[in-house]
Amino acid sequence: MKIFCYAVSKLEEPYVLNWSKKNNVEVKMIEAELSSENAHLAKGYDGVSSEGITPVDESVYTEFEKFGIKQLAIRQVGVDNQDLEAARRHGVTLTNVAAYSPRAIAEMGVTQAMYLLRKIGIYQDRMAQGDFTWDESTISTEIFHCTIGLVGVGHIGGATAQIYSALGAKVLAYDLAYDASLEPYVTYTDLDTVLNQSDIISLHTPLFPSTKNMIGEKQFKQMKSNAILINVARGELVDTKALIDALKNHEIGAAGLDTLADEINFFGIHKQPKDLPEDYQILKAMPNVLITPHIAFFTKLAIRNSMEIALDDAKKIIEGGKSRNTVN
């Protein structure tokens, strides 16, 4: 058995080699993400694994069908860059890794929220100008006096709920699916209540056509004027223009963003500052906005788990089995 792995970083290589040795499976690795330009490299292999945000079009699955490849193991939660129906038509089973380390992403969201709650960015901006004073505009609220609103409480949202609950905060949750195990940590309610009552609103829902721009002008006007928006899910859940307007007009207080709608153009690569998108430059200049380059997942445990779970799924499907992580 041979598996071809796209988008493998230097940090991931030891985990691939360890898995390969343990399972007696040959694994070829390259750094580039899977695309129509390099899909041909998988010819002669039994299975494929990849990750990333580069869109994968039908030509990739057409190639895989020609090569007899019947699966593609995605080493991440989101599969919005994949064409699920096209893959199905060409007999390619897609799997994701829904729970490689929910705590990793949950902790990043909470970290961003705490940074913004305590107005650290504003203090840093002032201190850079030699101003070490404080006043009523920068006074903070302690977390256990806050109401947290979670939009989506799957693996990551559930882990987020547990952290905030442990810190003493009241946690509201909106999700189409009800999970009784989260009752000790959250109070389920509707989206309007989450938006209206929460001091911190944290997004943990997948990106579908129905959820694209689900947080826009109308939703920002429903939020408290001091509300903090956290997005560690998918950038396109938020209307970026509406977010910028809401921040400029003081309709909300702050935003923590690990993901942006147009991030594919610059996250993960080197760019000259002058070449960065205008919306990024506007947001980055705001001291009440914190941006990180889609690295909420980036912990040692998460990298190991995502690689091992994906390769386990690839091996299982190649051998004729089924995976509970199948997404199409």
Image: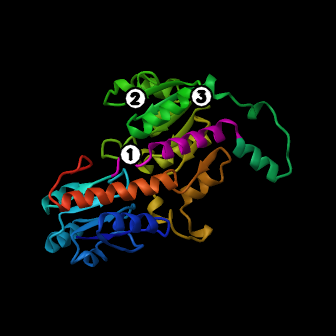
Of marks 3 and 2, the one in the foreground: 3
Q: Label 2 near label 1: C-beta < 8 Å? A: no
Q: Name the residue under label 2.
A: 174
Secondary structure of residue under mark 3: loop
Q: Label 2 near label 3: C-beta < 8 Å? A: no
Q: Give whichever of discs 1 and 3 has the lower sequence position.
A: 1
**Real-space Cα separation, disc 1 to disc 2, in angstroms:** 20 Å
Residue type beneath disc 2: Tyr
Residue type beneath disc 1: Ala
Expressed as whole percent of the image width and height from the top left, the position of residue 287 reads 68, 47
**Real-space Cα separation, disc 1 to disc 3, in angstroms:** 23 Å
As drawn, 39 above or below 263: below
Tell me, for residue 167, which label it has, or none: 3
Secondary structure of residue under mark 1: loop
Of marks 1 and 2, the one in the foreground: 1
Q: Give whichever of discs 3 and 2 has the lower sequence position.
A: 3
Q: Which residue is drawn at 18% across and 68% down?
A: 69
Q: Is 93 a magenta residue?
A: no
Q: Which residue is drawn at 14% across and 70% down?
A: 68
- The secondary structure making up most of the magenta span is helix
| Label 3 Cα neighbours within 10 Å, binned few <14 / some 14-19 / many ≥20 | few
Q: Quadrant of residue 320?
A: bottom left
- Foreground pick, 38 / 240: 38
Q: Give the range drawn in magenta.
A: 97-119
Tell me, for residue 99, which label it has, or none: 1
**Real-space Cα separation, disc 3 to disc 2, in angstroms:** 20 Å
Residue type beneath disc 3: Leu
- Foreground pick, 133 / 278: 133
Is residue 275 visible to the viewer in this orientation of the structure?
Answer: yes
Q: Give whichever of discs 1 and 2 has the lower sequence position.
A: 1
